[in-house]
Image (cartoon, coloured by chain):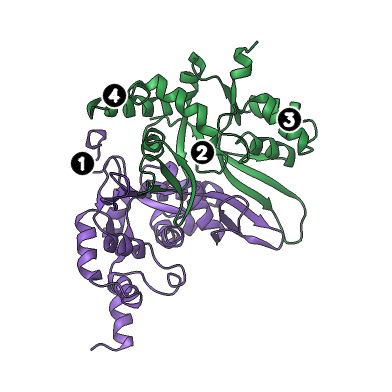
Amino acid sequence: MSTGADHTRLDEDAPVVFPVGHYMGPFHPRRHEPPKHHIVRVGWETPKLPDEAHVDIWALAHGLPARVDTVRWTRQAIIDAADDAGMPDAAAILDSLADLGLIAEVIPGTAQAREFAGFYRLQSLLIGLGNSPEDPVLDGIGVAGMPPVVKVRPRVFEIWEWAHLWPSVWSACEGLAWVAGEADGTHSDQADPVKVLDVMFEAMRTLISRNAAYLDVAPNSPGESRSAR
Amino acid sequence: MATDDDAALLFPIGHCLGAYYDQATSTGHVLEVRRGLDVIRLSDEHFALWGLAHGTPDRPVDQPWGRTGVLDAARRAGVPGAEQVLDSLVRDHLIVETTPGTDSAVDFARRHRMIPLMLGLGNTAEEPRLYSVGMIGQPVVSMSSMAYDLYEWAHLDSNLWLACEGAAATAVRVGIEDPVATDPLRMLNALLGTLHVLISPNTVYLDTRLAH
């Protein structure tokens, strides 16, 4: 049995897990029948979550808002959260979700992270609610007339506001870095796309755990074409 | 007698970013909307009119939302100079007027995209013909399978007309016989006729088309 300290050390090297796709809900083929499956749109395809257990673990892969600021969201973190919630078989279901292309794993700060960023794009949800005189630093994102779903610092808001206009996470990093370089000079950390990518991963977790954004495949990814629909 | 002007609908363009106060305790602020690659700063009056162009949630679904409805709502809300403000928003392409069933509707669709802002919540065992969108556990709007299809896919195309053509081609391929689902023009007109139902609670927004 590992100690808590061992656990933390191991988790620092483990990939973090992100869910992939835009949730499209249950599909009931006929009245008074249970759902045949739940649908997720990923690019021009719709992989299916075959049962409620897959839905629950895919939801956990988004990250628990109460934990994501302090816990690296790895397979183990998801399995722990599933155990806490009494959900069995989380490890096997995570394997199944990976096979379906509904979760993706990445180790920030590595060459694999750059590859990951080229393969996926970030799509934003909800609307901006701005800041307030009482709290001019943080910007709200949510639904009109309701308290913000999440309040974020300006760099995270900038990613939410703009990243979806680029075809991939990596091209968004390059574009945001170029804009920062034009504004602040090329020596700024914000003008380095690799450093922007580090911030991007933090922003993605904050936003995705609140359903204020989702990951999709980049339009030029292998196998990505309209004929798949 | 009804004229084309009576049938013209108003639609807001752009993604709401919210109000911005530049310092603590300041009452000075602007309201921002992103449209394409531009962020446009609006006064309270302009933002109010842009908001009213989304429609109002208490409005009957089948009531068209055009210039008269928006201006009446603006006057009731006490927005000063509503007509001039509306004209300036139309000039700045933050509000666009189009009439379903005319060439202007296809032109409108070619120039804009429709982007979802919420999750699909699927259908239910009680009413499998209706699909809803919203947040988890909070359905906001229900719609037909055709509208839900566009909600799911339309933003992947560079403009709304291409999306309607693609959805209609798919409907033909899978053997659907409903002409509203297989004819892109009828599909577009049906969508535009109920689009404010989706726009008013911000379940979608319209943006300018993509260059590619």
The chain shown in green is which?
B
Q: Chain of mark 3?
A: B
User: Do the residues at pointers 4 and 3 share their chain?
Assistant: yes
Residue at the farthest top position? B1
Q: Position of residue A167 (x, y in %)?
A: 37, 42
Q: Earlier in the sequence, mark 2 or mark 3?
A: 3
Q: Chain of mark 2?
A: B
Q: Position of residue A120 (x, y in %)?
A: 32, 49
Q: Residue at x 28, y 28 (%)?
A: B171
| Disc 4 secondary structure class | loop
Asked if the residue under mark 4 is in contact with the one under mark 1, i.e. CB atoms within 8 Å, the reply is no
Q: For the C terminus of chain A, give its image quadrant.
A: top left
**Disc 2: CA contacts within 10 A as few (<14), some (14-19) or many (>=20):** many
* Circle 1 or circle 4, nearest the eye: 4
List the residue tagged with mark 3: B72
Structural distance between the alpha carbons of marks 4 and 3: 41 Å
Comparing A219 with A25, the one in front is A25
* Circle 1 or circle 3, nearest the eye: 3
Q: Chain of mark 1?
A: A
List the residue tagged with mark 4: B177
List the residue tagged with mark 1: A223
Q: Position of residue A116 (x, y in %)?
A: 29, 54
